[in-house]
Amino acid sequence: MTGPRFRFAPSPTGFFHVGGARTALWNWALARSMGGTFVLRIEDTDAERNRPEWTQGIIDALAWIGVHTDDPHFEGPYFQSNYAEQHVAAAQRLFEQGDAYYCDMTGADVEARNKAEGNQGYQGWSRNRGLGPGPGHVLRFKVPAGTTVVHDLVRGEVTFDNSLIEDFVLLRGNGTPMFLLANVVDDMTMSISHVVRAEEHLPNTPKQQMMWEALGHEPPVWAHVPVLVNEARKKLSKRRDKVALEMYRDEGYLADAMVNYLMTLGWMPKGGEEIQPWAQMEADFRLEDVNHSPAFFDLKKLAAFNGDYIRSMSPAEFLEACRPWLLAADAPFPADRFDEEVFLAMAPVIQPRATTLAEALGVVDFMFLAEPAIDADAWAKATATPDLVGVLRSSSAAFEAVADWSADELKAAFEQAAEANGFAKPGKAQAPVRVAITGRTVGPPLFESLEFLGRDETLRRLRNADATIG
Ligand code: GLU
């Protein structure tokens, strides 16, 4: 594949962060719409923090949001740890051409000198000492004087004063490459033309650009995308916030909804309509239109997106989407009691009442449980109804007399009973009936639920509740 080359370069050190997912999606949209390539590079050089299962987690999570390894625009995954020789060779070249030098000072040495001489930072102390490689010698990049101007598609032109950038380490004392070097050398080797990544990497960019230039390459197009923040406008953090994409997937967020929402974090789709199909967003997305202020990762808005996507599914699509939960070991009801026809018929009343798929099954579990558990709070609320037993008995009698077991007739029968028996508030009197039938105080419309549940089971549950109270 010719055309621009983008890359996504996660470090497999934990769950897949929603911010990483957005970065991946933006790169993916660009690679595809520009007829280019999306390179996946797993930056696995921090042996202590990496685990193979995190790498698989990244690949699975990417597939979930539509970044598939078998797509013609996809290349990789490459593993950074396989390229250590090239990283070292590049460092060697920098040394040979005079852009890097060895240094034998330890961190403690630097600190001691700073203390004694009132200096700050490293200050190029070994620049002119002519040291060669040796045990404990680090290789440092010789930062040139002047300024470094980074042209960033999101942030505009950012100028860095080189005098504030110390001669940074390329190779550690044991000869292993530092991350910044590995990252640049891989981008060069993989002919990356566009580096689109999180804003937190911007301070590294002048250093990386100097390396690109010193190694005789035109730097890539840079784009540093805004951070995601929580409600308190603090950067999303693993410890504080729910950041793992996998958790949303497991709770029953739909991939399409998640993708759509992530795309809009810092970017407004054309025309201002946020709910958009992927193909449209892919075609319209431009880095130039990305806002550079932090983007609020709003859980309520995400839930609203998800609810919207759930509502727009056909019953059959909805059933398919729910299937993993239905088949799970901890399914909300036994598989042999599940009835697809009933579920499909109820879908239109469930879909508007759930923001996640997991929640959706809670809305209908009463249909498929032999004996839905009545939660204590719900029962306490329901039993606050004046003349509870009277309400249960007269509605039972009214339902029993219904000729055609349909929501409309059940409703009419209930209302007549309410009037005849002087229920204080017929609306409230529905509550104990609902609790007796579903175990909950909220749920799908009551009379539709009774229709689906059927005459025998409805009457049995009402009798049961009556007996329990009696
Ligand atoms: N591996 C780095 C990270 O996960 C990404 C560096 C980059 O995109 O240049 O933060």
Image (cartoon, grey):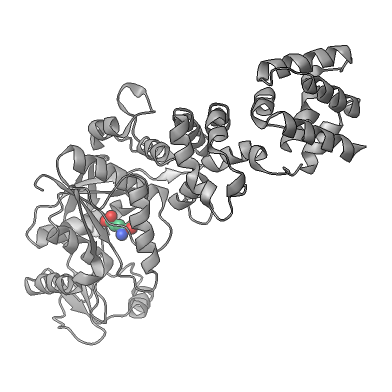
Q: Residue furthest bottom?
A: 135
Q: Is residue 109 left or right of residue 387?
A: left
Q: Position of residue 69 (x, y in %)?
A: 25, 53
Q: Residue at x 50, y 42 (%)?
A: 322
Whether 315 is drawn above or below 119: the answer is: above
- The C terminus, quarter of image: top right
The residue nearer to you, when weighing 265 against 433, is 433
Q: Position of residue 191 (x, y in %)?
A: 12, 55
Q: Residue furthest front?
A: 403
The residue nearer to you, when weighing 187 against 253, is 253
Q: Taking the image as four quarters, which one is ligand 1 found in?
A: bottom left
Whether 452 is drawn above or below 427: the answer is: below
Q: Is residue 307 left or right of residue 153?
A: right
Q: Residue at x 47, y 31 (%)?
A: 315
Does residue 241 appear anywhere in the picture? Answer: no
Q: Position of residue 258 (x, y in %)?
A: 41, 40
Q: Is residue 363 left or right of residue 393?
A: left
> Residue 22: which quarter of the image?
top left
Q: Is residue 78 left or right of residue 374?
A: left
Q: Residue at x 77, y 19 (%)?
A: 427
Q: Position of residue 110 (x, y in %)?
A: 33, 76
